Amino acid sequence: MISQWFNKSYKIHEIPTPESRGPHDILLKVAVNSLCHTDGVVSASIMGTKLPCIGSHEGAGTVVRLGSSVTAFKTGDRPLAGLPQNRCDHCPDCLRDEKYQQYCPNLAGQVGITLDGAFAEHMIVDGCESSRIPDEVSFEKVAPLACAGCTV
Ligand SMILES: [Zn+2]
Ligand SMILES: [Zn+2]
C-alpha cells in the first residue's frame, strides 16, 4: 500500500539529533542542502522509500561528532556527504578495483532515499563515502556536487 504521505509537500518536524549507525559514521551539522530531480522521484514513492524519511541526498556541513573508526576527518572539518552509506567491504562489488562501490547489495542505504538525508539540522553520513571540501569552496557552491560530483 502506498502511504498517504507520498506525493505531498514536505512538512517540518521536531525530531531528536540522529544516532550513529556505526564506527565509520559522522554527525554533521548541515550547512546546506539542495533539491534534486531524485527528490521528486522519492516523493512520488518510486524509489522504495519507507516513510518517515528526511529528503535530500545533496548535503554538506561541519563535523560535530566522529565514529571511532573515522580517520579522514576531525571535528570542525567540512565534508560533502556521500550518498551510499556503510558498504560491506567484502562483497564482489566492494572488492572490485573501482574505489566507489555504490552498488554494494549490503549497503545500509542511501541518504535522502532510504535513510534520512540533508533536509535537517543534523544528519549522519558515512565517513568512508564523504569528501573533503577545499577551504576556498563555499558550502553553497558544493552541495549539488554531492550527487554528480562524487561520481566524478
Ligand atoms: Zn559490499
Ligand atoms: Zn541527485
Image (tube, grey):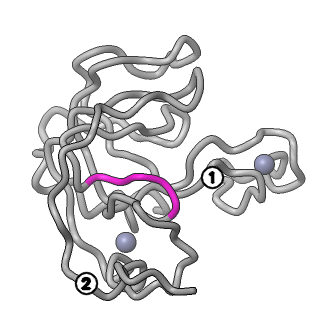
Mark 1 to mark 2: distance in Å?
33 Å
Residue shown at the point (21%, 54%) measured from the top left? 142
Residue shown at the point (44%, 40%) measured from the top left? 130
Q: Secondary structure at mark 1?
A: loop
Q: Is residue 116 magenta?
A: yes
Q: Is residue 146 magenta?
A: no
**107 versus 6 height, above or below:** above
Q: How many numbered markers are drawn?
A: 2
Q: Which residue in the protein does label 2 denote?
A: 8
Residue 55 located left or right of residue 110: left
Q: How far across and how far down the image is residue 38, in percent?
A: 39, 79
Comparing labels 1 and 2, the label whose residue is closer to the camera: 2
Q: How far across and how far down the image is residue 145, in percent?
A: 30, 60
Provide the major secondary structure of the magenta segment. Answer: loop
Residue flagged by tag 2: what amino acid is it?
Lys
Q: How far across and how far down the image is residue 107, in percent?
A: 68, 51
Q: Are marks 1 and 2 in contact (CB under 8 Å)?
A: no
Residue flagged by tag 1: what amino acid is it?
Tyr
Q: Secondary structure at mark 2?
A: loop
Q: How far across and how far down the image is residue 60, in percent?
A: 25, 45
| Residue situated in front as seen by the camera: 3 or 74 | 3
Asked where in the image residue 125 lies, by quadrant, the reply is top left
Q: Earlier in the sequence, mark 1 or mark 2?
A: 2
Badge 1, how many Cα within 10 Å: few under 14, some, many 20+? Answer: some
Q: Which residues are magenta?
A: 114-118
Q: Which residue in the protein does label 1 denote?
A: 100
Asked where in the image residue 150 lies, by quadrant, the reply is bottom left
**63 versus 47 height, above or below:** above
| Residue situated in front as seen by the camera: 58 or 122 | 122
